[in-house]
Image: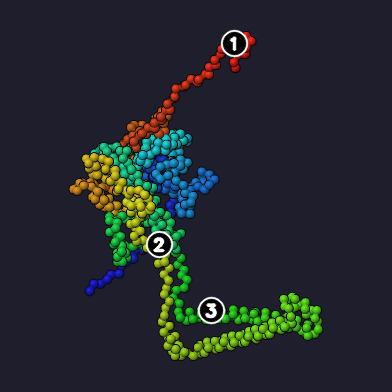
Amino acid sequence: MTSKTDTICKIFSFQDHKSSPDPIFDISPECLQPSPVPIVIDNGSFQTRAGWACKGDKLGSPRLLFKSVAARSRGAARSETQIGNDISNLEPLRWLLKSQFDRNVVVNFEIQELMFDYIFSHLGVATVGSVEHPIVLTESPCNPLHSRQMMSELLFECYRVPCVTYGVDSLYSFYYNNALCNLAPPHSGIVLSSGYHCSHILPVINGRLDAANCKRVNVGGSQAASYLQRLLQLKYPGHLAAVTLSRMEELLHEHSYTATDYHQELEKWRSAEFYEQEVHRMQLPFSAKVLGGVVSVEERQERRAQQLRRLQEINARRREEKLQQDQERLDKLVSVQELLEDGYLEQFHKNLVELNMDSAEELQSYINKLNVVVEQGRQRLLQASEMEQQMEEGDAVNEMDPDFSEENPETEKTVNVVQPVFNMAEYHQLFVGTERLRASEILFQPSLIGEDQMGLMETLQYVLARYSPEQQGALVRNVFLTGGNLQYPGMKERIERELLAMRPFQSHFQVTMASRPAVDAWYGARDWALDHSPGGDGWISRQDYEEKGGEYLSEHCCSNVFIPMTIVKPVLRPVETPLVPVTMTTATSPGAMAPI
């Protein structure tokens, strides 16, 4: 005989993190001498990270980490704008939140300028009119030339920076982790990155990005959070206001995972035992004041008796009011009839018209009917008063007779009945079951949210098919995963399984995950700035900006490929000479008129 162990319920509470404002740091002398140290900014669509390109644990880590959002009401001044961690709770101000991004491309440069002001002021840059530090800035893969042109214009014209360099965040992470693994450059591989708004597949051949074969999937963390929110709001329509986007992001980061085999994992959730073991119960905040509780039989009987007395009093009051109205109407009709008996015919007929009656016979019939109604009303009042007296006497007998409950077996049975307690805490719990894996599955099946496009692995297969078998083998030997939206447990195993089904039999591949998928891009940009001094290869100086334009990009191992903008000059058509009409003249005699 097997013994069943009670399953322990996994009950979790939402943290509801409240961010605190970032401190304003004092700039360290190491960042100024012997030359200004570059400022590294990972301009992410979900979170911005900024710091100094220095070595060490203190200065060599991001000094600022805040969400890339700004809250400013319409018509408010720039000084009233709240940015990043200045907003302690995003939910009340979500309708005011603005971002500089459209998907992963910077388009709102007014908000971007506010972000730069926030970064420079909190890092302690106090120079007036300019920023004397070089800038290392991340941008999206295959960033449009117009976006880079506006960014360069903002940095060089507004902040007057000495030089700037642009790089792709996921390539910086690739660069950093290859250096950690002591892989000799140039590196080849394929980078799978997934951020807040979209995901990318970036093939890298001999240390350079193959921009012609880069692909984007328009699914990221924001779509996963919105999908999870819709699932739970449909499941719990009574808690719509409590299922917020901030809590859904917390569920994604802390409680979601990726299934190695999606359909097989869903079959496991059909088992009641598996469900009880794996379901996460998220406790919502609620008031501990419970209406009711354990109510005894005596209290329920007392409440019912009070309600009965209250109803009887209301009915008695209504009967009395109805009887009084009928009696008044009867007295009025009788007084009109007495006018006829006393011989006041004129007044009698006048009152009949006011009563909307035609004759004395009709008046008499109404008087007879009202007499019957009044008499019945009086009898009902007498009966109700007698019933109330009997009930009061019965209650008194019950109180006087101590053996009344023993003589009545039915009341003895009802004493043992206890009303079930309403569990207020359980009512305010969200049972997160299959939603834990369904949210991350949209990376592989965008059709779950109605997106008509390929998933991440289908797109990877399409990209690999564009290369020769030798190049495919070189790329899959280093499949690199980075980005905050690939941190789900089981993500690496799922991609390995998909690659195993995709690649030829007995072919070799290797999948590696970034050591810190969310922040490795910043550390990679820092290491690149330490290895490449400002003014050298990969940097755009002010002179380059003025001579080659704002869209110019100095390429390096972690940058996009620069494709200059070609302006097609219109072809000048040859000027055709206009045709001049020729008038024919003939010789005429002196007296004749010439032709007009």
Amino acid tagged 2:
Lys
Residue 235's disc number? 2
Q: Residues within 10 Å of mark 3 (few under 14, many from 20)?
A: few
Name which residue lies at 35% across and 51% down: 446
* In this view, 321 is above or below 241: below
Element type at mark 3:
helix
Depth-wise, is mark 2 or mark 3 nearer the camera?
A: 2
Q: Position of residue 164 (x, y in %)?
A: 39, 35
Q: Position of residue 296 (x, y in %)?
A: 45, 79
Disc 1/disc 3 C-alpha distance (Å): 131 Å
In terms of sequence position, does the residue under pointer 1 or pointer 2 come before the other? 2
Q: Is residue 282 left or right of residue 304?
A: left
Q: Which quadrant would the C terminus be assigned to in this image?
A: top right
Disc 1/disc 2 C-alpha distance (Å): 106 Å
Name which residue lies at 28% across and 48% down: 513
The residue at which mark 1 appears reads as 588
In terms of sequence position, does the residue under pointer 1 or pointer 3 come before the other? 3
